Amino acid sequence: MTVTTDPPKESFRLGMLIYDTRYRAMTIQVVAMFGFMLLLGWLVSNTIRNLDALGKGIDFGFLWEPAGYDINQHLIEYNSQMPHIRAAAIGLMNTLLVAFMGCVLATILGVVIGVLRLSRNWLVAKLMTVYVEGFRNVPVLLWIVFFMAILIETLPAPRDFRSGEATMFLGDMVAFTNRGFYIPEPKFTAGLGDVSVFNGAFAVSLDLIAFLLTLGAGILIARLVKLRADRIQEATGDRPTTWYLELGFVFLPAIVLLWVLGFYLEPPALKGFNFKGGIHMRNSLIALWLALSFYTAAFIAEIVRGGILAVPKGQTEASYALGLRPNLTMRLVILPQALRVIIPPLISNYLNLTKNSSLAIAVGYMDITGTLGGITLNQTGRELECILLLMLCYLTISLLISAVMNWYNSHVKLVER
Amino acid sequence: MKKHLLLGALAVAGLAAGAASGATLDDVKARGKLKCGVTTGLVGFAAPDANGNWAGFDVSYCRALAAAVLGDQNAIEFVPTTGKTRFTALASGEVDVLARNTTWTFSRDVDLKFEFVGINYYDGQGFMVPKSLGVSSAKELDGATVCIQTGTTTELNLADFFRSNNMDYEPVPIETNAEAQQQFLAGACDVYTTDASGLAATRATFENPGDYVILPEIISKEPLGPLVRHGDQEWGDIARWTLNALISAEELGITSANIDELAKGTNNPEINRILGTEGDLGGMFRLDKQWAYRAIKAGGNYGELFEKHIGESTPVGLARGLNAQWKDGGLLYSPPFR
């Protein structure tokens, strides 16, 4: 009979938390975490205690008091008797508007400039280099102020249009003034009217919805036509000519709808101090939009250039060998592969653009920093509440942009097996 | 994200910690410097001159206060604040006193937890337009584009004025007086509105002041005065009575020219109490007997300061109007020094 002796079973001792390497790392992390929470707790309690000492407890009730101030650019109904929260919502919409417009223009400009920077044409490539270095090496605040100054100082005042010193463009449809651009507004003589949503929180134009639905349906049918053409081509080798069908399906129903609704363009007209009618694009919006777009475009251009250079040269050569022309090579071979490299840094530039839009107050554009974080904060004196809400807003916007772009990224990225 | 929260909390805690500290007088004495919040630049009230020295009506009040507390009218750090940043600057302890054409209102006094120590200028909101516009009354401004400094009471008055008159307008919010000036001169707005004194001061800096008119309507009461944080009564008293000393000095005929003569003793007991030759008023708030003497000596009495910085002989050219002594039909009335 053999006696096997088990090694003595090691029981857990407290000292092992420090001396045993298996547990030590865990101990350090727990202690660090504890310390961090303590610091955080101290900061929060200190803040609350001091605010209490000042007699200013945290209270969000002010959001439902009348705001008392007017906002020039409001996408939904607003007047000074509406509550602060409504003013904050107006500001949020203005932020989203300029961020969206900025991201679109910055992407278009950035891609074009990034591709042109790789051009074989020496002059074009160098000009684009100058653009990129110029814009990204000057703070965006200066660009915003610069664009605003140009708009204010170079364009004529509305009263110059009366005296004939300045004239409107495109058959008296468009006016460029130092208060912004006035463009015609689409109107309907037999419109469907508006429908109010969320207990009348804001109104949505039924005409716009009808138009978008018709256009969407048209595009869908055009796609079906194209798919059918693809099928016929694969089966028989002959592709039926469908471009006039596609064009017809996309545009004809929309045009018929516009005609039925009595669509017309209402031009701006000079009345009193200002132009009335039409759509007023304020110079604060234009300056901010252009400055943010041009600035961010410089970064996007570099990302696009890097993305294209990341695609091996062999791909281009292979594409040429197959007989594709440079144009098609770029569109069908290089860009789809470059996108995988481009999109992640692109996301962060969209986020930057959105956050940079908080400089809007420099030109008096009423974004959420200007309303909630500016006038509301100042008139109510609720600094902490306003800033916390403001941070929450930007955080939400940024996370939403990230989520959408990450979804798109996972959509286009290389599927590896 | 955690990092952002932490930094935010740190900033807030810093802000609150600064605000909670108690005796401002001790802080100022220990620092040897008074931190005074002023405008970013409004000629006549507070603006740096060619040599970078701050001068103006509001600045003079700060100099008087520094002279009273520290004995040196130049021991001041001027902190330029915008309409938007001023209250945060004061609440956070970044400045000890705010002398920046700030309107005394209920909510600022009560809800924002500040203490207005008096009124150094009785003002009202007005409108300035180019003469070429041909407007003679604010009631004709329907549809106009109005430049306005953001974060001020003028913003709210403007909304009320246009609403109660059923008129329409386009507000152009602007951060500082200088930017407003640029937009107004370029014609990007038809009207510039702020306190009438501010309009006069701004117009004084124009190339052709004569091309612009200030409309007759005054649409609000704007009592402007210095303010301190609520809760430190002693510091509030010092700030209040320094202002009252300047006003009383004018009433009693104490000027920077004759103050040394009067400080030797007079047969007017109130002058003696102010200048410290009789009783010890300064000791009641832990200053010496000479505090008011130094405050008045720094730049002169209220009337002298008014004439020097914003009076009719200056480019700003404001008449005394409501800001005359009560004996002359104005509203200035200092409680007695007793």
Image: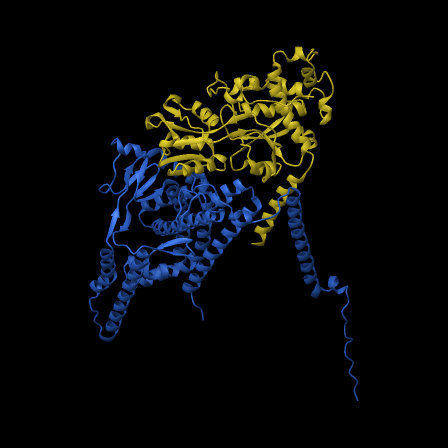
- Image coordinates for residue B32, horizontal then vertical, percent: 67, 28
**Front-most of A42 and A50?**
A50
Chain painted in yellow in the figure = B
**Front-most of A77 and A199?**
A199
**Front-most of B71 and A316?**
B71
- Image coordinates for residue A281, horizontal then vertical, percent: 35, 43
Which of the 4 image quadrants contains residue B271? top right
Is residue B246 depicted above or below A121 in this figure? above
**Front-most of A391 and B161?**
B161
- Indicate the colour of chain A: blue
Q: Classify residue B88 as left or right of residue B130.
A: right
Image point (67%, 33%), residue name: B233
* Count of picture labels: 0
User: Is residue A311 visible from the viewing direction of this image?
Assistant: no
- Image coordinates for residue B33, horizontal then vertical, percent: 64, 28
Is residue B90 depicted above or below B134 in this figure? below
Q: Quadrant of the N terminus of chain A?
A: bottom right
Q: Quadrant of the C terminus of chain A?
A: bottom left
Q: Classify residue B12 as left or right of residue B210.
A: right
Which of the 4 image quadrants contains residue A15? bottom right
Q: Classify residue A197 as left or right of residue B42.
A: left
Image point (52%, 17%), residue name: B307
User: Is residue A283 visible from the viewing direction of this image?
Assistant: yes
Q: Classify residue A279 as left or right of residue A143.
A: left
Is residue B254 depicted above or below B96 in this figure? above
- Image coordinates for residue B226, horizontal then vertical, percent: 58, 29
